[in-house]
Amino acid sequence: MYEKKQNIFKSPDLSKLKEVIIDYRTKIYIALDADVEEARKRYQNRNSSGRIK
């Protein structure tokens, strides 16, 4: 019989990330040196292209 390998999930260290608020219920975390506006624009472009219109 085979033993299932345990998946180890390691949470990211939020002290090394910067929080970006997209809207009142959406927050993303980016690197400290990353551009906030660029991250917000990329997030909105990615979500708008995947929606069915």
Image (cartoon, helix red, strand yellow):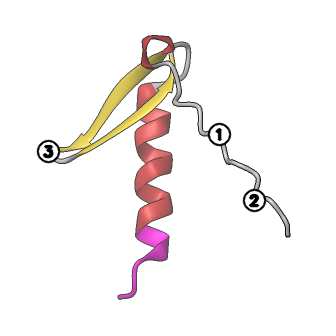
The C terminus appears in which quarter of the rendering? bottom left
Label 2: which residue?
Answer: 4
Q: Does the magenta stretch include residue 5?
A: no
Q: Which residue is drawn at the image coordinates 50% and 60% (left, top)?
A: 46
Secondary structure of the residue carrying tag 3 is: loop
Q: In which quarter of the image is residue 14?
A: top left
- In front here: 2 or 46? 2
Residue for point 47% across, 59% down: 45
Image: magenta residue range:
48-53
Which element carries disc 2, helix, strand or loop?
A: loop
* Mark 1 or 3, closer to the camera: 1
Q: Are marks 3 and 2 in contact (CB under 8 Å)?
A: no
- Report the residue that reaches farthest toward the front: 1
Q: What is the C-alpha distance between the residues marked 1 and 3?
A: 32 Å
| Residue at the farthest bottom position | 53
Point out the image quarter for the N terminus: bottom right
The residue indicated by pointer 1 is 8
- Residue 2 spot, x, y in % from top left: 85, 65
Where's residue 15, x and y in %? 43, 11
12 or 28, nearer to the observer = 12
Q: Which amino acid does label 2 sit on?
A: Lys
Nearer the observer, 11 or 23:
11
- The image shows residue 41 at horizontal and vertical percentages of 44, 46
Please name the amino acid that badge 3 sits on.
Answer: Tyr
Q: How far separated are the C-alphas under marks 3 and 2?
A: 41 Å
Mark 1 falls on what kind of element? loop
| Structural distance between the alpha carbons of marks 2 and 1 | 12 Å
Q: Is residue 50 left or right of residue 25?
A: right
Mark 3 — residue? Answer: 24
Is residue 5 toward the left or the right of residue 10 in the image? right
Above or below: residue 34 compared with residue 9: above
